[in-house]
Image (spheres, coloured by chain):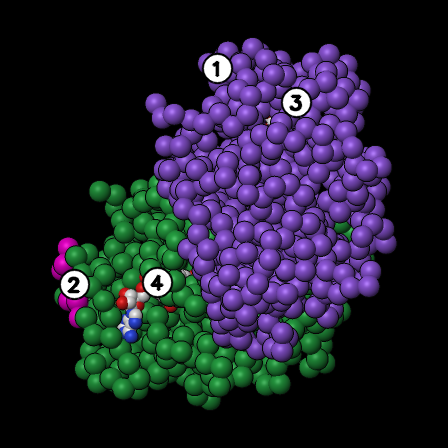
Chain colours: A purple, B green
Amino acid sequence: MPDFPVHVVFPGRIVFVGFGSIGQGVLPLILRHVGVSPDRITIVTAEDAGRQEAQEYGIKFVKQPITQENHAQVLGPLLSTGDFLLNLSVDVSSIALIKLAREKGALYLDTCIEPWPGGYTDQSVSAARRTNYALRESALALRTPGNKGPTAVLTHGANPGMVSHFVKQALLNIAADTGTDAGNPRTREEWAALSHKLGIKVIHIAERDTQVANIPKKLGEFVNTWSVDGFISEGCQPAELGWGTHEKTLPPRGHEFDFGPKCAIYMMQPGAGTRVRTWTPKAGSFHGFLITHGESISIPDYLSHREGGKVVSRPTAHYSYHPCNDAVLSVAEFAGRNWQQQERKRIMNKEIIDGIDELGVLLAGHKKNAYWFGSQLSIEEARKLAPYNSATSLQVCVAVLSGLVWAMENPTQGIVEPDEMDFRRNLEICKPYLGPVVGSYTDWTPLTGRNSIFKEDVDADDPWQFKNVLV
Amino acid sequence: MPDFPVHVVFPGRIVFVGFGSIGQGVLPLILRHVGVSPDRITIVTAEDAGRQEAQEYGIKFVKQPITQENHAQVLGPLLSTGDFLLNLSVDVSSIALIKLAREKGALYLDTCIEPWPGGYTDQSVSAARRTNYALRESALALRTPGNKGPTAVLTHGANPGMVSHFVKQALLNIAADTGTDAGNPRTREEWAALSHKLGIKVIHIAERDTQVANIPKKLGEFVNTWSVDGFISEGCQPAELGWGTHEKTLPPRGHEFDFGPKCAIYMMQPGAGTRVRTWTPKAGSFHGFLITHGESISIPDYLSHREGGKVVSRPTAHYSYHPCNDAVLSVAEFAGRNWQQQERKRIMNKEIIDGIDELGVLLAGHKKNAYWFGSQLSIEEARKLAPYNSATSLQVCVAVLSGLVWAMENPTQGIVEPDEMDFRRNLEICKPYLGPVVGSYTDWTPLTGRNSIFKEDVDADDPWQFKNVLV
Ligand SMILES: NC(=O)c1ccc[n+]([C@@H]2O[C@H](COP(=O)([O-])OP(=O)(O)OC[C@H]3O[C@@H](n4cnc5c(N)ncnc54)[C@H](O)[C@@H]3O)[C@@H](O)[C@H]2O)c1
Ligand SMILES: NC(=O)c1ccc[n+]([C@@H]2O[C@H](COP(=O)([O-])OP(=O)(O)OC[C@H]3O[C@@H](n4cnc5c(N)ncnc54)[C@H](O)[C@@H]3O)[C@@H](O)[C@H]2O)c1
């Protein structure tokens, strides 16, 4: 057995809430890289899934769905000062759990900001309030003056999460490759200034999952390489994107926010029904879904460059996700049912026979046009690297691990977003699990190959207008 | 071996042009049901595909791509009065072959009206002229006064083709089920009057192919259950549809024609990039591609009901095609490449392990809302019924057979469309090969389940407006 470095010794208890594809994938990583004994870990989850794995590692497994009513009662006794609440569930309010952790003096990490069930599709709430933008605002509102208190890491999976670190590395690489003096940026202002200096107009979180299985998707079945419920939830939220200062016109059904930092917009349609053009090194150009994500808001907010208090430069930023083929088919079927969920769901795992998850950030508009930086992890390599994982889950799980380690190393940072964390420390922990991590320039733009068989309505003057990106 | 009825004895020669999935599938049916000896059949095709099958049946196989330059020279000597030219190729002009057949006094049948290569995507030709509407006009223009001459059957596969016969059967069934006196319609005018009387507003050719294989589609591969080239060609043509008299507004990028009968419109976008809502009994509601097809124009033209010389009632009609899942993925990839064809192609055949091709017509707007009538042939049953076929090919091949038999039985009809043929005779020949042929009423409309998570811009007053159908 290889010698795994223990990144941090943790004397407290760790409580998992939820133990699905991510929980199951991250547990072995925590046991490998964090100095904590199995008897100090408890899993609280809604189903039996993962019970066997918990048993294998000697971890206490409690099947008890957490609700608005019972969450303090069930989780409260498991948490006190210096413990860790790790939220890897669906259908449990992140806000409620952050509050509870802070009351108890416990550290916290989640991989997205979730509401209680129904919060994403509740038509009695305005679409603007069903966005990640609004969820982020309510999480940030929990900050006390000076942002003190036990560290609570928001939205730290692969994306949102690790991709914020990719963006910083990519900015430094582009600076180096274009002969731009990057300095040594450490503050938000300095990173924003660097992005501005490089002329970054657009950041796509560009992901192409090519994993395929040896059994075909069935009719009435939603198949994915990670949470079906999670993907359906975010896919039904309004499409949202960080809105760059170079953008000339709102997209059809696009709306600005009338609260918060106004760094983003939303569209009155589900992300799973919204397609955008993007590019990754192995896949080339493709259409992804514009699924709303925390990073689409936090990254452009973080990179907003101000002069005289006014934002003068901010990139457009959004997720462009081509999930595995079976998930593309599942979304098509789901759309054909007017967003009524299929009867069955399946998270692909053992049945995966081939493919990679190519996940990275595409930074465009600079001197060398566009640069993708990210991970090209294959299913084969993922299986060699860690048990209970696919390529997709491992990219997420190692980012959960790195965020958790960082929080343990920095336990009094208050409520933090990925962009506010030490990207070098996080990438250092993640890298051994990411397969090939590559940077690649491309001359592709959303105008490449357009007007091939029909005249299209494009903005030929500025390739990186969102108008050109939207399908 | 079961006793197969010989529908017609044919003393002439038969020349196949093209021998792909349809040619290969139809040959055994012709040998079964037409009195013709193998030595009177010749195959002229562009590739080696099917050579072994031809050998097995003792059929002459000539590998010689037909071009604009060589077609008369290569095919001419193979044809004289009373012979049959069966065009099952791609990339060969139907118009040119019809002319040749007529010069020689030979009968003719094809399954779509094709131009010479490049004709579908030639941007130097206006989009309006790249439509099936325009191709149909040029085929009908070959008619001599009184439409005399050897029978040339246009566009007689499953669809276009057999679905025109389904429509007539469906009209009679709806009349019977709504207590409407149908009379005994025989002429175009009588069928149009019946459609008008029943209040038919919309006809979808609604197809859901659920066939799946045991090997996944590869990156850069276009997979389908029938011609990849054929599907790509028609998918790149402008989306077109017969345009009903009840329609209030043209769709975005929709255009009327300024020539011909003006029974249809086209959209300035490829059909493979245009989605429409429809319904079949087994699949329920789904999104199909609005791929242009001959029947979308011939059916509404045929059913145009006139009063005082003016069209007062005509249904909207179009194809709504959900091809097999691997083809849906292939189209998505193709779109992401801006309609640049993938490097590899594969027509699924032996690797199919499950699924049906549910192909029929959905007639809507009448007293009982909507009625689907069609075939639900499974791969299993197709394999039992005929060699060298999938569910998809068999539905096409049996329609080729029935059209060919009808032409042989009616050899002096000139140039005819499916709508002008004897639907009873055709269905009689087809039926044994179609698996379950079912009629099914539904209360589904394109408004069913809408506004589920977002307010949508719909015409609530008239469910069957195309505006509600378009995704
Ligand atoms: N940031 C990222 O990169 C990223 C990536 C993948 C997943 N995620 C998020 O991580 C979370 C987990 O994803 P997953 O793939 O493991 O999901 P999953 O669907 O596989 O598992 C969800 C888990 O939550 C549990 N659960 C459901 N309701 C619960 C309740 N009321 N109380 C307690 N537990 C409950 C389920 O029993 C299950 O164990 C999701 O919110 C997902 O959106 C983030
Ligand atoms: N109406 C319908 O329901 C229906 C259904 C399926 C297919 N079709 C049409 O039938 C035709 C054949 O379909 P398929 O699935 O068999 O296609 P396929 O791609 O399997 O085969 C095409 C055949 O045409 C031959 N060919 C190509 N170029 C040629 C040339 N220049 N000269 C002679 N032969 C040439 C190829 O060698 C091959 O044998 C297509 O036009 C398709 O659009 C119609």
Splitting the image into four quadrants, where does ligand 2 fall? bottom left
Residue bearing the label numbered 2: B59
Give the distance between the C-alpha atoms of the residues marked 1 and 2, in whole angstroms.
68 Å
Q: Does label 1 or label 3 sit earlier along the sequence?
A: 1
Magenta region, residue range? B55-62
Residue A231 visible in the picture: no
Name the kind of residue labelled 1 in the image.
Tyr
**Number of marks present in the image shown:** 4
Residue bearing the label numbered 3: A84
Q: Is residue A253 left or right of residue B405?
A: right
Give the distance between the C-alpha atoms of the residues marked 4 and 2, in whole angstroms.
32 Å
Of badges 1 and 4, nearer the viewer stands 1
Residue bearing the label numbered 1: A57
Name the kind of residue labelled 4 in the image.
Glu
User: Would the CB of label 1 be found within 8 Å of ligand 1?
Assistant: no
Secondary structure at badge 4 equals loop
Of badges 1 and 3, nearer the viewer stands 3
The disc numbered 1 marks a residue on which chain? A
Q: Where B209 falls versus A75 (above or below)?
A: below
Q: Where is residue A281 drawn, in percent x and y?
A: 44, 57
- Does the magenta run of residues contain A64? no
